[in-house]
Image (cartoon, helix red, strand yellow):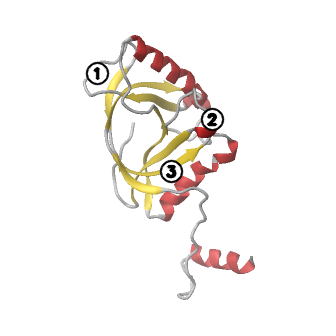
């Protein structure tokens, strides 16, 4: 343990001995770096607690069905703020459902092309709960450990529906990234 502490301290000041390999972070999730294609979606911006997502999504599905608009992909949430540092009433997020290009949004919603780009992605299996929320810290650690930096919001793609067992849920956790030192990336 003492040797690990000493090596860590030396690494922080850039004085690691040539024969000592750098320490790699241990991840409990599998991550990939990939390209995300732009998507055309019906969206609705929100502010406040992220806990309102499921209600907003249910309303959006109901409104799409009432206007005979068929989704062409799984729903997603885009989360612009870190709830650990942003007051709950200031959190900004959106609900989105991919639709065919050119489809008109129901009243109260808008359609928009959402930018694609380079992302780091992992998939959570089962219901999101306290036990598997370490993925949010780990994805940012993975990003930095691989020479990238966050370049946009966190996105969750929900590849499940409320009629299946929560143990069968699949949720993609995605963060837009860019090479460390680069400028640009998708924003709000």
In this rendered view, identify the residue nearer to me: 29 or 165: 165
Closer to viewer: mark 3 or mark 2: 2
Mark 3 crowdedness (10 Å alpha carbons): few <14, some 14-19, many ≥20: some
Q: Residue at x 38, y 40 (%)?
A: 187
Give the Cα distance between marks 3 and 2: 18 Å
Q: Which quadrant holds the C terminus?
A: top left
Between discs 2 and 1, the one toward the N terminus: 1
- Rendered location of residue 130, percent (x, y): 69, 42
- The answer to whether residue 127 shows anywhere in this view is no
The kind of secondary structure element at disc 1 is loop
Single out the residue that lies furthest toward the bottom: 19
> Who's the residue at 56% across and 41% down the image?
82
Q: Quadrant of the N terminus?
A: bottom right
Counting residues from the start of the chain, the first of labels 1 and 3 encountered is: 1
Alpha-carbon span between mark 2 and mark 1: 31 Å
Residue highlighted by disc 2: 166
Residue 122, disc: 3
Residue 129 visible in the picture: yes
Mark 2 Cα-neighbour bin, 10 Å: few <14, some 14–19, many ≥20: some
- Residue 52 lies, in percent from the top left, at 58, 25
Q: Quadrant of residue 16?
A: bottom right
Would you identify the image quadrant in which residue 183 lies? bottom left
Question: Residue under circle 1?
Answer: 103
| Residue under the point 54% across and 32% down | 91
């Amino acid at each position: 343990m003492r040797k690990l502490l000493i090596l860590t301290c030396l690494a922080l000041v850039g004085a690691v001995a040539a024969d000592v390999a750098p320490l790699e972070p241990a991840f409990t999730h599998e991550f990939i770096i990939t390209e995300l294609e732009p998507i055309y979606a019906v969206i609705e911006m929100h502010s406040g607690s992220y806990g309102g997502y499921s209600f907003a999504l249910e309303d959006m599905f109901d409104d799409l069905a009432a206007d005979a608009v068929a989704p062409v992909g799984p729903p997603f949430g885009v989360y612009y703020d870190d709830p650990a540092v942003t007051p709950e009433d200031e959190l900004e997020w959106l609900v989105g459902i991919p639709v065919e290009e050119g489809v008109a949004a129901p009243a109260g919603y808008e359609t928009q092309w959402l930018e694609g780009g380079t992302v780091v992605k992992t998939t959570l299996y089962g219901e999101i709960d306290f036990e598997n929320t370490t993925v949010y810290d780990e994805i940012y650690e993975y990003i930095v450990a691989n020479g990238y930096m966050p370049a946009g919001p966190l996105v969750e793609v929900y590849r499940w529906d409320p009629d299946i067992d929560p143990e069968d849920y699949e949720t993609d956790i995605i963060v837009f990234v860019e090479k460390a030192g680069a400028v640009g990336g998708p924003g709000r």
